[in-house]
Amino acid sequence: MLSLQNMLKGLGAAAVPCHRDIYKAARSCLTDRSMAVRCAAAKCLLELQNEAVFMWSTDLDSVVTLCFKSFEGSNYDVHLAVSKLLGTVLARALTSKQTTVPTKHNSRRISLEEVMELLGTGFLRGSHGFLRASGDMLKGTSSVSRDVRVGVTQAYVVFASMLGGQWLERNFSAFLSHVLDLVSQSHPKAIQNQMDAIGCRCCVSFILRATVGGLLGEKAQIAAAKEICQAIWKLKKVVDASVSDSNLETRISTTDVTASQHVLVCALQELGSLIHGLGTTAAPLLQDSSSGVLDTVISVILHPSVPVRLMAAWCLRCIAIALPSYVSLLLNRCIERLNALKSSPEAVTGFSFAIAALLGAVKHCPLGIPHGKGKVIMTVAEDLLCSASQNSRLSVQRTQAGWLLIAALMTLGPAVVQYHLPRILLLWKCVFPSSPKDLETEKTRGDSFTWQVTLEGRAGALCAIRSFVSHCAGLLTDEVLQRLLPPLPSAVDLLTQLSSISKSYGNSLKTSSTVYRHKLYELLAVLPPKMCEGSFHAVLKELVVDLTIPDSQFDASTFLLPPLCHEDDLLLLGPLLQETDHRFIEEQLLLGNNIAGGSLEYDPYSIYEKLTKRDSVPKPLPPTLSVISAATALFGVIFCHIAETQRLQVLEQLLNSIKQTKGSRQQIVQLNVVSAFSTSLKHLANCKGSLGPEEVRRSALTLVLGALESNNPLLRCAAAECWARLAQVVSDSAFTAGLAQVSFDKLKSARDVVSRTGHSLALGCLYRYLGGIGSTQHLNACVGILYTLSQDSTSPDVQAWALHSLSLIVDLAGPLYHVHVEPTLSLVLMLLLTVPPTYTEVHQSLGRCLNALITTLGPELQGSSATVSALRTSCLLGCAVMQDNPDCLVQAQAIACLQQLHMFAPRHVNLSSLVSCLCEILLDNSVLVNLCSSYLLLRRAAVACLRQLVQREAAEVSEYAVALVKESREDFTPDINIREIGLEGALLGLLDKELDQRLCRDIKETLSHMLTSMAVEKLSFWLKLCKDVLSASADFNTVASIDTTQEEETAKVDDASILTSESDERFHPFSNPRWSTRVFAAECVCKIINQCENAGSAHFDITLAQERKQRDSRDDFLVLHLADLIRMAFMAATDHSDQLRLSGLQTLQIVVRKFAAVPEPEFPGHLILEQYQANVGAALRPAFAPETPPDVTAKACQVCSAWIASGVVSDLNDLRRVHQLLVSSLVKVQAGKEAQSQQYNESTSTMEILAVLKAWAEVYIVAIEKQKNQSDSHNHSLKTANSAEEGYRDVTSSASSLLDLVQADLGTLSKLWLAALQDFALLILPSEYASQLPAEGGAFYTAETIENARPHYYNSWALILYATSLWLTSTGFIVADPDEGVTNLSRPVTPTTMCQDSSTRPSVKSPEDVNTDRFHLILGISVEFLCSPRSDAAMENIIACLHALQALFDVPWPRSKIGGDQELAVELLNVLHRLILTRESPDIQLAALEVVRLILFAAQEHVKEKRRSAEVDDGAAEKETLPEFGEGKDTGGLVPGKSLVFATLELCVCILVRQLPQLNPKLTCSPAVQSGKHLLLSEDGSRLVSAALLILSDVPAICSPEGSVSVLPTILYLIIGVLKETAVKEQDGQLPLPVAASLQALKGLLSSPMARAEKSRTAWTDLLRSALVTVLDCWDQADDLLRELDEVSLLTAITVFIMSTSPEVTTIECLQKRCIEKFKVTLESKDPVVQYKCYQLLHSIFQHPNKAVSYPYIHYLASSIVGKLQETEKSKPENAAEFQVVQEGIKVVTALTAAAEEEHRAHLVTCLLPILISFLLDENALGSATNTAKNLHEFALQNLMQIGPQYSSVFKKLMASSPTMKARLESAVKGNQESIKVKTAKLAKNPGKCSSIQLKTNFL
């Protein structure tokens, strides 16, 4: 068949003559016994129908019948293949233009109705054909086989998919009515019993979900939802008519009512799923009154049939999850209807189902519901329970409804439930009899009806408590547990009596008692075991009975066992147990004949529970089955907690019960017992318990062995897992070895398939939980046996199980397995080549073996030795063989193996062939129009592999994919044009169509990896992709209006045109993508911006970008696409989908933040974003509309503040648009709690209010910062320019305008900010202060929603704190509103007081108190946060907090508070110290140091003030008696922990030692540091060191004289230490920042008044001398270390000592000598810069007013200076630097001359004049001279002009004595008279050069 298929493919139309023969051959094969043959025949026929016209024309009927026959008794693969054939043939029949057929044959076109009818007959009548209804069909006994029904269901989906989404859109109403008709009463046979009905409903739901959910875009889905609504509405009318009809025909019409129920269930389920998928995009559908979705669904809640009511409730739940804004509204409506229709049983159950379902939806809605709803529902529930006994007609319904509501209420979590707990516990207590005696009297009194009500009520109560335990674990305190306990014993008593009760009342109570059992077991399983130990014995007896004498005769293995098997082992059992696209319908085939699967009506309590991953609707199983699963779970719990002797009895009893039963019954008992025992082993393993003595082990072994040899493969799997758990629980090596021996013996002797498969798997599993195989002996034995078994070609099953087991052993043995790798590999290869491909299970196991072997070899596969390369080739060969296997799961294994190989040996995997293989699987749509490979696991494997490949080689993968399409083979026709949109676009398209969650997640990750590695290189491409996705459905309404006209026109065209018309759509790569895909695209845009930010600055600099683009046109930069970015953000932000709006606003915010500073090159002074202000405004406006959800508004507030704060728009009128939005929100905030909408939880209004306040805070902060910057620059400009007035006006206009905007609302804002901070302060109190919190909540949160409100406060407090602090400082703490005292920092709405009762509060506070409160509020919040910022605390928060403190201490009043309160100041310093220790960020550390500086300043002010007032007071008294102010009092002692000075020093030392570890004396002794070279500080490091030094130099000012003496050595050590470490010569000759700072600090310290205060003077003098010695010493040490020390810095330090201290420090002879020595050495330096600086310093020393200081220097150094200058007569300066030296030297000598006494003056002038004259040039020389010589000439002339007149006598004498000089001077003066004038003018303007340098280093 497969060969024929390939031949047909090759021949095409040429094979027409033999088509009939092939058709006949394939017909017989299609119903062959072997499934593989059927699959091959289906594939062959599928190929045949491409050319063979008769298949879909004349022989259509027989083809269809043949397919139905083929479905009989088939498996999953046959379903897939045949349904593909059937669907395709029918689609062809419908669309073909029948020109090829001779007219006489079949001229009529087949219509859609007829095609559907053909499929429908298969669905309803199975393969019995159309006319040949067999006898039993007439008798009405037979029902259609499930295989056929499931196959036909898949064919429906294929049929619709082949015709495509557009066709479905046009013909949807016909399609819908046909599909719904399948379960309607017109075909009673299909739904004759409940099981069949559930099965059919399941199939119909699948057809609708796969077509509507998979093929239609969002717009079409909305139209489909309207159609479904109309269908429901029509049925509803029929029901209403029949219910109201009270005449005789009512009996007939009740069948009508039940008849429509299945149709309604399917329609409602699809409507729910549709809206759920659409999310908030469905809003227009619900607002559209014409479709009336909500009315329709709510009206059906009163339907007489329970499944319909439940499904309507479920549909409401879906609507609520999709559109969270409707939750409260729907709840109100249902509660109101329930109260109104209390007397109707349908209404009571229907609306209680609806309320429960809606409550279950709340946890999926982040915005929640108002807290008060819980109270309302609790009241309704109590009311129902209390009134249940009043009316017997409603008792059951009311009881059930009451408990259902309470159980659902529990899902709202502890925050809501804690308020109702006492009432719930009371109801729980009342529902059970209080003593065994009461139970007895109950038994004697009741009749069957009262028992039914009682059991219903008690089951409900048990369910409610179970819900409480699982959803509100936080409330399970010991006290609550004590109150839960009393009713339990009587509940268990009732359990034991149930059998006798049901005996006496017959079958009517059977279901109620089963439900009661189920609920009790479920509750006991979740309660803490200690609670119910007393009842264990009784419960265990019941459990054993349930397990061994089950009610049901169903084989429940398929739902009991899979959870107990290991997921790896389930792979053995074929595709049915794995996830497939068709899992939803295939499940019915699993469950055996009597049950079709679960359905909501079996357990209404599941309506509020969370869904399992796979299901779209909860599917509880029938009670008889769910009891068994609850019993096995509970058995597992109890078995662990009973005594070991009792365990033995229980096991014996179970074993006996298995022995005593026979046949199929025995299998059921065995299955139940094994599942129960397996659960208990799992529990024992989890709690590390032991199984018990030898006897218990023996019984356990017997039990498991029996199951290992059972006929049911699932049971064997579960038993093998049990085997492994048994070994784990006993954990004794001898016992484990014994288990292995049992299997070895069995495998050697047994010949039957069952025991060989069971025991081979047991061998593989044995060591699974023991940490791997450790013994080589065991390993060798296993490998030997499994080798033999895997070659047993008589039984593929044995081969498959043995190979699977071998793969487990390879994994468990790890490195031990290396010896066996080669033989195993060759075995695997041999089997891959010899086992026929039809035995897919063997090939799948081989794939797993190969995978395990590759993992074992691991990175060794990269090796180059011969053996390794041989192994590698074998692995690749194995993969290639598996890739060619027709079975999809084997192909998936091949891909997984290649993925492993690529991980370990990437160079050796052929990427291009692998990528093309993956692309074919994912994107080839020659198979189906919209699906890729129809096998889910294969698609998953392909995407997982791609994900790994792109992590390493994204670019290559993408290129290969495009190359593959360019080769464009015929059979590969991707439906998306990869050439244009690349693999990335194809994956995006796939993401849009794929419904499987896991696959979607993998595709997103793959795309993210590709984006990270390639977005920057392929920028335009990625942005275009995102833009295409986002704009594909930019606006519903416009698209819809255009489309309707088209639809009307195309409706006239026949169906055949559909295939041609599709080509028009090709220009748009994405047609109508879903909202989730669009959200992903918006997230991608944000990621792209992020990637560009890391890639370089050109992306955010338009001038640079344009330059580089001109240089190389291939370059691409983000800034050039700004318009697109804004457009995408705008489209997303204004969409219908809330999720997308949030992403759009987020994108907009990022764009604004990143591009705010980019200038517009064409209009200087403007920014590039300015042109987009209209777009930004338009994107934000809808988010402030009243119906917008609060989370969107909150996000929009952030964008508003980012936009205003960015400074893009400076014009007030333009800013007003966005500003107005914030103002409107502020008005809303002021309206207060009363005005809040009752739509969402109260905490959402907290979120919105805080977002608004935070946004305003950000704007205010920026306005103040701008104002500050401008006043700084203004002050600066005042110094430089005279016309500053006009300049100033222009500059400040923009900042003041921003401030003006805020100023208007500042009064209100400040109150709201303070109120929010006060709330926050209360919320961060530790839990033990909870009782002190105000009972009614705070200004912006309510007491009940305190937990939900907290995160919102944490999000926004920091900026609000900073803004408040700025506001308080701007008012200087002077302001106090007249009403301020009354409101006490909070707004009038809720006068929250700081834990005070209003009666005890003083009526008005003084401004001083108000200010103090505010000061402590800000300080308290800051300290609390900075004390222990959580490790995840955002940097912005810490910095905002530190800035707030800076602002606070910027004004005098708070400074006086902190200065006067030393403890507070010390505490704050300690907190900052800890912050500096724990946070590395330099920004944080600098901000913290600034706060430290301000605190120190405050303390200085305080000390000064004290000293001043003391002097004033004691003016008359003696000076001696003045008390000492400042730290250290008279003793000079500092107390750590209490001393501000000590805390400051600690903090500064911490900073300095961290940056310069060499300063730490402990370290300096260690050899590591000694030899170390200089570490250059980073720029941040330098700034930190400088800040710390300046703080240090201020410390003595807050000490008393004695105190200053004790800190001085430390401070000097640190300052000089820094100088010593950082004074290194730099290349550019710049002075390093730390050096400058240390010199500055030194100067500040030395000029401290303490140095002269009488009490401390002598000590200071001694210390300062030592310090000077240290400086001099470090020079000498430097010579030994040969470091490039900067002499200038050290000389400057010496000069600072000489100039700033009192003379007695430096005039000691020995010190003076050393200092002079240093100057002398430096003067001799060859470096002109050093010489120049040295002259400068000497210049200042020579001018020292105290002669004792200056004379020795003049004495020793003047002569050498003059000498050096005289040398320059001979060697003239060559360059500017040398010229500067000469200049400075001459200045020094000139200054000396001025300072000298009369008699020495003449001598100096006579030395100076010849030098100056020698610099002059004559006219001729001047023209050709160098620049330096010219400058020198001018300088000399100038000086001569000054000196001549000053010392005229000496001048004249000298001129007379030397005629040459005279001549030279005269010629220079004459010749340059003119030019001199010009030059002097220039020189006068240009003395800036030297002065600027002086400014920088002028520390003197």
Image: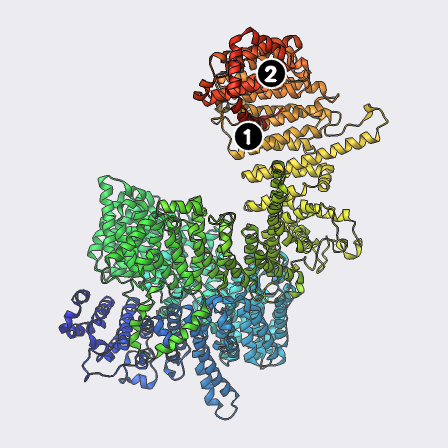
Q: Is residue 159 above or below residue 1287?
A: below
- In this rendering, is residue 1360 above or below 325? above
Q: Which residue has dot 1 on it?
A: 1633
Type of the residue with mark 2:
Ile
Q: Secondary structure at mark 2?
A: helix
Q: Is residue 1861 left or right of residue 800?
A: right
Q: Residue at x 72, y 46 (%)?
A: 1373
How packed mark 1 is, by other alpha carbons closer than 10 Å (few <14, some 14-19, many 20 or more), is: some
Which of these two is toward me, 531 or 954? 954
**Residue 1034 placement (x, y as % from top left):** 44, 64
Q: In terms of sequence position, does the residue under pointer 1 or pointer 2 come before the other?
A: 1
Q: Is residue 755 visible?
A: no
Which disc is residue 1700 wearing?
none
For the residue pair 199 and 123, the one nearer the viewer reads as 123
| Residue 810 image point, x, y percent | 31, 48
Q: Secondary structure at mark 1?
A: helix
**Is 877 situated left or right of 1242 in this image?**
left
Residue that carries the numbered disc 2 in the rendered image: 1843
Taking the image as shown, residue 306 lies to the left or right of residue 744, namely: right
